[in-house]
Image: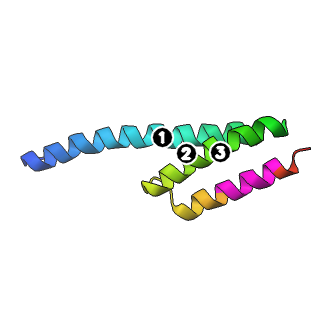
Amino acid sequence: MANHKSSLKRIRQDKKKNLHNRYYAKTMRNAVRKLRAMTDKEEAVKMYPSVQKILDKLAKTNLIHKNKAANIKSSLAQHINSLA
């Protein structure tokens, strides 16, 4: 167990941030999964900007790497273009 006041505070803050980050990461994964499962092109095109916004926000806050966000956006765009 930590002995210093500052380390106890750091532990409290880390728990809170971890919970916050897990929520947004999971939300992003679910949104990407949902978009990849879509078969209707019109719906997918409508949903793509919101997923793109989520990915950009997570990359900006360093929750995911900016290249990972770019790769996911690219693969989603390819998926949408492949829909008939």
Where does the image place residue 22, in percent across and percent down from the top left? 44, 41
- Name the residue beneath numbered marker 3: 49
- Region rendered in magenta: 72-80
Q: Which of the 4 image quarters holds residue 18? A: top left
Distance from disc 3 to disc 2, alpha carbons, whole Å, reads 9 Å
Indicate left or right for 5 with 68 as reference. left
Distance from disc 1 to disc 2, alpha carbons, whole Å, reads 9 Å
- Name the residue beneath numbered marker 1: 24
Q: Which of the 4 image quarters holds residue 35? A: top right
Please name the residue shown 87% across and 45% down the image.
Answer: 83
Indicate left or right for 30 with 7 as reference. right
1 or 2: tag closer to the N-terminus: 1
Q: Could you tell me if the residues under marks 1 and 2 are in contact, i.e. CB atoms within 8 Å?
A: yes
- Name the residue beneath numbered marker 2: 54
Task: Check the image and tell me how it is coloured.
Answer: rainbow
Q: Residue furthest left?
A: 4
Secondary element type, mark 1? helix
Q: Is residue 20 visible?
A: yes
Closer to the camera, 23 or 70?
70
Q: Could you tell me if the residues under marks 3 and 2 are in contact, i.e. CB atoms within 8 Å?
A: no
Secondary element type, mark 2? helix
Please name the residue shown 62% across and 60% down the image.
Answer: 70
Q: Is residue 31 magenta?
A: no
Closer to the camera, 50 or 61?
50
Q: Is residue 3 visible?
A: no
